[in-house]
Amino acid sequence: MLGELTSKIKLHQRPMSVNEALRSARLVRKNFEVPLVFRGAGPLLIGRDERLVTLVINDAFISRTHAAIIQEDEDFYVQDLNSKNGTFLNGERLPPGQRSARPLKHGDRIMFNTVEFEFIIPEESV
């Protein structure tokens, strides 16, 4: 099962220290964690085209550039990038091309079509 998950989802991100990864907010799906460390590099792009995005989800129902996670100061937002099959926050579909109206909170559920992640903020930050 984990092999199937890791072949479906890949992360293209510069190496980071363990301490940096542990302090960062993250997206979690089963045993796969995506640390959200931006370092001024712009949003974390999510989609199926590994030439264009950081978080690759190999699924026919995921757009080439499906969504983005955006950081503004200490807050994170999810934005749909006009995906065909939608980006959902806690079961509510985001309007195409729009970002979440409020910052993400610990425990929020984000779905890119049917691929679901949980947004986690490290305990010391909650």
Image (cartoon, helix red, strand yellow):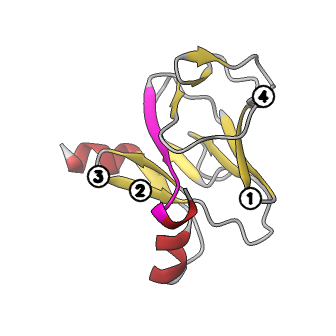
Does residue 21 appear to the left or right of 95 in the view shown?
left
| Mark 4: amino acid | Ala
Does residue 44 appear to the left or right of 91 in the view shown?
right
Query: Which label number is shown at residue 31?
Result: 3
Residue hosting label 1: 74
**Does label 3 or label 1 sit earlier along the sequence?**
3
Secondary structure at badge 3 equals: loop
Locate the N terminus by quadrant: top left
The answer to whether the residue labelled 2 contacts the one labelled 3, judged by CB atoms less than 8 Å apart, is yes
Query: Which label number is shown at residue 101?
Result: 4
Compared to residue 29, the image places residue 97 above or below, namely above
**Does label 1 or label 4 sit earlier along the sequence?**
1
| Mark 2: amino acid | Glu
Tell me the residue at 41%/56% (across/down): 33
Percent across and percent down for residue 40 are 80, 69
Q: Which residues are magenta?
A: 115-123
Query: Which label number is shown at residue 33?
Result: 2
Does residue 28 appear to the left or right of 75 in the view shown?
left
Viewer-closest of 112 and 92:
92
**Does label 4 or label 2 sit earlier along the sequence?**
2
- Residue 58 seen in render: no
